[in-house]
Amino acid sequence: MKIKMTEIRNEGIPFDTKYFENINVNRSAVERRAASLGGRRTVKKEFQAAWLLKAITCIDLTTLAGDDTAGNVERLCAKAISPVRKDLLEAMEMTDANITTGAVCVYHNMIEDAKRSLGNSGIPIAAVSTGFPAGKISFEQKVEEIKKSVEAGATEIDIVISRELVINSKWEELYNEVKACRAACGDAHMKTILATGEIPTYTKVAKASWVSMMAGSDFIKTSTGKEAVNATLPVSLVMIRAIREYQELTGIKVGYKPAGGIQKAKQALDWLILMKEELGDEWLQPNLFRFGASSLLGDIERQLEHYITGRYSASYRHAMA
Ligand SMILES: O=C[C@H](O)COP(=O)(O)O
């Protein structure tokens, strides 16, 4: 399956505080709305398998560990190419659907291994960049790192922003940083990680989302997976509403990637429902929506097996996912 990002990219708009200076997010209203989602909305049993397969196509199958090796990147890529067991696909009459994950996501120095392992599958390689996860390297090093990853074959670059610029409300500096990263990406699509667990208020999350989109991000992404608090539904609601407002202003659709701590099929369904309700069906496609996840696929496969056979298998049977 050839996974394509949207053809019309977000080129950004000139910096102007007027778009976001009056934002003031009502924390309790956001948390109430997010809490109501999980309980109120469920996917009917007969549609669950289809939704779970959809979720798989939106996963950036990730390994970002100090002990990553060529071998485990190879296994990850094999899983990205064939994420669901053949017998399960056969039972669902989905063998011809050519289901793959949305991308694989690795550190820069594993790009070569990923490229070799993915061959001509068409699955994009996303590389984390700009001093991931903390972003504590110089601006010049950040730009250099992006360029090297693009040269090495990454077609998606996940950058981290400088959190201190958000904490200290240095919005124009943040804009300039993100814009320079976007320029360094060239044709590679850029996902901008806010690291929301390190941003003190929802209002600042909303403003950082706006500035990142104004500077040309193709996606905005919650977390690195390394913060103490990673993707949550309330923070997603704040970011998704910023995407909606940005679209209302510019006509441009920016993608969304919750990442970190999404391990269960049920969580994946909650996020898909949130996307559908807040942004519509277009954001249920991998060109506008991704999960950043290292272990979600294993639980989805278990749930699919349960759907088909009525039994759960042991989680070790779905290793690496
Ligand atoms: O961007 C992806 C995250 O690093 C994955 O986090 P996770 O290992 O909690 O699924």
Image (spheres, rainbow, N blue to C red):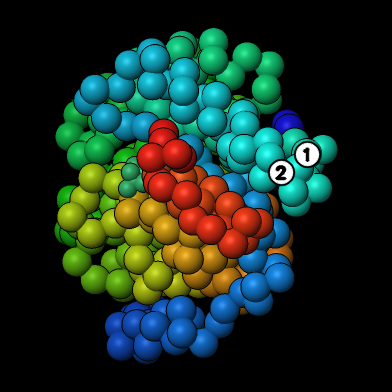
Left or right side of 22 for 151: right
Task: Please report contact status of discs 1 and 2: CB closer than 8 Å, yes or no.
Answer: yes
Left or right side of 315 for 82: right
- Residue matched to label 1: 95
At mark 1, the secondary structure is helix
Residue nearer the viewer, 44 or 160:
44
Figure quarter occupied by ligand 1 = top left
Residue nearer the viewer, 282 or 252:
282
Residue 319: image x %, image y %? Answer: 41, 36
Q: CA distance from mark 1 to mark 2?
A: 5 Å
Q: Quadrant of the C terminus?
A: top left
At mark 2, the secondary structure is helix
Residue occupying the point 49% across, 45% down: 297
Count the marks: how many?
2
Q: Is residue 302 above or below residue 29?
A: above
Residue 89's disc is 2
Indicate the amino acid at tag 1: Thr
Q: Where is residue 237, by image quadrant?
A: bottom left
Ligand 1 closer than 8 Å to the CB at disc 2? no
Indicate the amino acid at tag 2: Leu
Q: Is residue 104 above or below residue 279?
A: above
Q: Is residue 239 above or below residue 217?
A: below
Q: Where is residue 129, by image quadrant?
A: top left
Q: Is residue 254 visible?
A: no
| Neighbourhood count class around disc 1 (C-alpha, 10 Å): few under 14, some 14–19, many 20 upward | some
Residue nearer the viewer, 67 or 200:
67
Residue occupying the point 59% across, 47% down: 56
Could you tell which of marks 1 and 2 lies nearer the N-terminus?
2
